Structure formats: structure tokens, C-alpha cells
Amino acid sequence: MHAVYPLVLGALLFAIGLYGVLARRNAIAVLMAIELLLNAVTLNLVSFSAILRDRYGMGQIFTLFIITIAAAETGLGLAIVLLVYRQRATADLGEQRALAEPVEPVTADELSPRNVEAEVAR
Amino acid sequence: MGNTGHGETFLFWVGSIISILGALGLIFSKKIVHAALCLCTVMLCLAFFYMAQGAVFLGVVQIVVYTGAVMMLFLFVLMLIGIESQDSLVETIRGQRWLAVPFVLAFGFVLIGVYAHANLPEFVGTDAANAKGGGNVQSLALLLFSRYFWAFEVSSAVLITSATGAMVLTHRERTVPRKSQREISIERFERWGKGEKVSLTGLPNPGVYAQHNAVDTPALLPDGSPSEASVNATLRGRDTVRGFRPLPLPGARRNGAAVASRGDAGNEEVSQ
């Protein structure tokens, strides 16, 4: 088996995970897509460790550290998701607009035909 | 193992196809639970790869920590949020999928360019490296506790900090003392004295063992009709009260007509 196939698999998994991070809207699904990204990276690390015969003694150790950090990140991330769900009753990332700029409502006066005509004339 | 044999190549192809399908299921499944199970599949496949490449310890860690701990944490939180939670797959940005196509093509070209220029050898496992340190675990431990000792300590600090942070974030401080059963009872009688409709005797138990072994089953009144008050108010509000099949009670006339569906089960008046 050529050494390129595991690397290509890692790249494919990474691409799919990236699309998941961008496209999913549920916070938990986004966190899971991030886990997929980390898994793709660890696959690449282990593959390179095997290809280079662990010459630099890094691939597997780094994978261990990545798994550790991923566990920590998941714990904190899920705690935040739980907190958001408790306060807002939704974990949808599109709904979290508490810090967004308020959209100014269009008053009925502005929509009246006379004003619109004046706007067009100007 | 040494060089990768045919069996390992076969395992790789099967596993890679399964893991790609799992990853696609992760981003395209509507229910979050299905996505979580798909991610579990991907992680298990990767664990098999690690073991096949000779990184046995990593494979075990992948299964124990990732599939065993992290994914179960995900499932716990899913259950707290609602196992039925669904994700709308409607595009957030208009034309997102069509925009993704050129990016995917560009990424593919970059990938092909990079890997075509790379001088990659025939694939070998980590056995040679393992043999040098006297085994996979031994060589890992040698590195972990000598060269990467400082990083090891720092990562333990990170773990402690994140555990503390998660506890602080999810902790809720009770601002008023919890009411005792006596106080609740007195309050209930006071409300009843003011003329409110409160059931003084407490609510009836759910109909566990009456027809079905679940808490969303309404209890049956002596005339065979379901008691609305016997089911948790949350379940009633979500309209997930289980329908019941009327028991053939001798001499009861209304049994025959009452074929309750999910929604109808809790609608009848409580008449105790």
C-alpha cells in the first residue's frame, strides 16, 4: 500500500469536518464536527509517524496530547452549550443574537406612499 | 508485521470507506443522535487503523478516551438538551453548497499537487520504531517522561482547569432554601382555602404497570378513562403522552368508543 492513501483519507475527513463546522447549526453538532477535524489531524500524525519510522519521536506523542486537549475542550464546550440551553432554551447557533446589533424597525410613516415617492424623486 | 501486507491493505480500504461514509453521515444526518453514532463509527475505524499501523497504545486510547468518554459525554448532554433535537439542514448562507464545490475542487488540486511532489515511500508500520524502544508502550513512555515531560505536566494542568471550569459553568447556586414537605403542604391548603382548584391529596401516580411500563402512560380512572393529572406536566406540555388502549371492562359502556390516540389521551376532564 502506498503511503499516500492514509494521508488522503485524513485530508478528506478534515474537509468533511470543516464543512460540518461551517454548515451545521446545532452547537453539539458543531462540536462533533470539530472532533472529526481533530481525528483527521491525529490520523495524519500517526501516518507520518509510521512513514518516517518515528524518526523524530513526535507523531504518536502529539496524538496523545491532542486527545488530552480534545477531552478538555469537549468538557468545557459542552458545559457552555448546556449553560446556553438553560438560559435560552435552544442550542441553535443561529438563534444566539443577544450581542448582535439591533435591527431598527421600519416605521409605518417611512413606508407611506408619499414618503416613498419623495425618496424616489430625490 | 513489518511491511504492510495484503490483509492490512484490505482492512484499510474497507475501513476508509466506512469512515468516509460515517463522516458524511455526521454532517448530513438530521438527528443529532445519528450524527453522534456516525462519529463513533469514524473513531472506531481510526482506532483500527492505529492498531494496524502498530500504534497499539494509541488505538486503545482512541477507543477508551474518544469513543468511550468523549462521545458518551456528547450523548449525556444530548439527553439533557433533548434526544429528539433536530438540526435544520437549510443553508445558512444562500448558495452555500454551490459555493462549496469550487472550494472543494481547489482544495483537491492543492492536495494532489502537494502529495504528487512529496517523495513518499512505501508504507511501513511503526514496528521498527517500536522495536527500538522495546515495545510500543515502552517507547511512548520513554519519550513522554523524558523529552515531553514538561508538556505532560502542562496538559494535566489544562485538564484540571477544564474540569473545574465545566463544574463552575454548570453549577447553580440555590438562592432560597428548599421548601420542606410540610411547608409545601401548608401552602397547598392555603391556596385551596382561597378557592383555587388544587388537588389536596397530591397527584395520582402514572399508570406504570396499568398498561405499559413507562412514565408517559396515564393512569386509568375506575371508569376506564385516562387521568390527565397522572402524567408529568412537562410531558403533557410536549404532547408526548402515550395513547392507551381501553381495557375491556365488564359493564362499562364508554370503553368501546374511547380509542385514544397520543393527543387525546390527556384531554379528558379529571373526575376524581
Image (cartoon, rainbow, N blue to C red):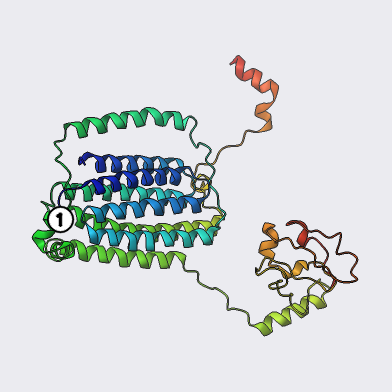
Q: Mark 1: which secondary structure?
A: helix
Residue topped by disc 1: B127
Q: Position of residue A49 (x, y in %)?
A: 17, 50
Relative to A68, say whether B9 is above or below.
Answer: above
Residue at 67% across / 58% down in the picture? B238
The residue most toward the front is B6
Corner quadrant of residue B267: bottom right
Near-viewer residue (A35 or B192):
A35
Q: Position of residue B76 (x, y in %)?
A: 48, 62
Q: Position of residue A101 (x, y in %)?
A: 50, 41
- The quarter of the image holding the C terminus of chain A is top right
Relative to B249, say whether B24 is above or below.
Answer: above
Can residue B67 be seen here? The reply is yes
Q: Is residue B120 left or right of residue B14?
A: left
Near-viewer residue (A28 or A41):
A41
Q: Using the image, name the chain to which the residue with label 1 belongs.
A: B
Disc 1 marks a residue whose amino acid type is Asp
Q: Is residue A62 left or right of residue A114?
A: left
- For disc 1, the neighbor class at 10 Å (few under 14, some 14 to 19, many from 20) is some
